[in-house]
Image (cartoon, rainbow, N blue to C red):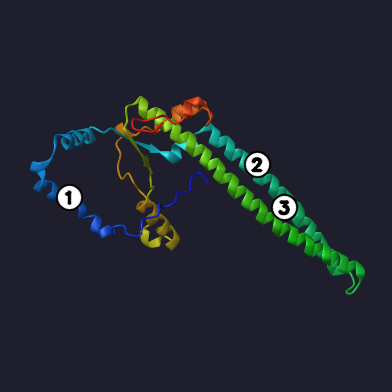
Amino acid sequence: SLLRTGAVPQPAMSIPPVLRMFLPASAALALLVSASAQTAKEASATRAARGLTVGVVDVIKAVEQYPRYIKLRSELEASIQQYEAQLQEMSARADELRGTIQVLAEGSQERADKEFEYKLLLQTQDYRNKAYRDQMQVQDLRNTLSVYEDLEYVIGVVARRKKIGLVLQKQNIVPSAQPIEDLAPKEVQARVQAYDRLSVWYAGDEVDITGDVIKELMIPVPDRNSPERAPKSRPGDKE
């Protein structure tokens, strides 16, 4: 679903986390030694980096208020409810057959026919459950991808309007009401993984553009194949 997240695979030769903590200090020493050799171009690049404007977005908050996401979610939930109604009908029929089988004489042809029908119904139910579950998973992923593409476009619109050069995902991890010692192991693991994926540990209100993104999402977002969303050429791109 839209709220699911995944860790980005790390390369096999990635630097161990403990060593990463010391890299900034090592890099600073190297720069100090070679400071006299720094070119004017490097100095200009450093000044440009310092002037970079950063914004953050609470993706979950923005998506949950996106009208198209709400519509897609409602359609998916309606489909699930419809299937559950069909499933209840099949379960009722299975209960009926099971009751009928119990009162029929063993070895009779009628009982054999009902037992065959009962087994066939259970097999059909299992097959339909798997097929429907797979179908819903694929549809959920398609909906999620579509919404993410819309969100990416809208964030770009807002960022360009506000002259923001970098937008990061903001994630609010609400502290648990229970003491950490009382949390279930799975919840502890989930919370640790959430912190592992955290890219923004603090963001002031002045850099939070979530509200602007939500306002833009209220306006009908152009279709993904419309000219407005065509990839923009950048300096250095080949024709």
**Left or right of 157, for residue 126:** right
Would residue 239 be seen by someone viewing this image from the given angle?
yes
Residue assigned mark 1:
27
Q: Which corner quadrant holds the C terminus?
A: top left
The number of numbered badges drawn on the structure is: 3
Residue denoted by label 3: 87
Assign a secondary structure to mark 2: helix
**SS for tag 1?**
helix
Q: Position of residue 81 (x, y in %)?
A: 67, 45
Q: Which mark is residue 58?
A: none
CB atoms of marks 3 and 2 within 8 Å: no
Q: Which circle's residue, 3 or 1, is located before the other in the chain? A: 1
Residue drawn at (35%, 48%), measured in percent from left and top? 198
Mark 2 or mark 3, which is nearer the start of the sequence? 2
Q: CA distance from mark 3 to mark 2?
A: 14 Å
In contact (CB < 8 Å): disc 3 and disc 1 = no
* Residue annotated with mark 2: 78
Q: Secondary structure at mark 3?
A: helix
Give how far across and how far down residue 193 sits, in percent.
Answer: 39, 55
Residue 195: horizontal and vertical position, in percent?
35, 52
Amino acid type, label 2: Ala
> Which comes sooner in the sequence, label 1 or label 2?
1
Query: Relative to the observer, which residue lies in front, 162 or 194?
Result: 162
Mark 1 vs mark 2: give the one in front: 1
Amino acid carrying mark 3 in the image: Leu
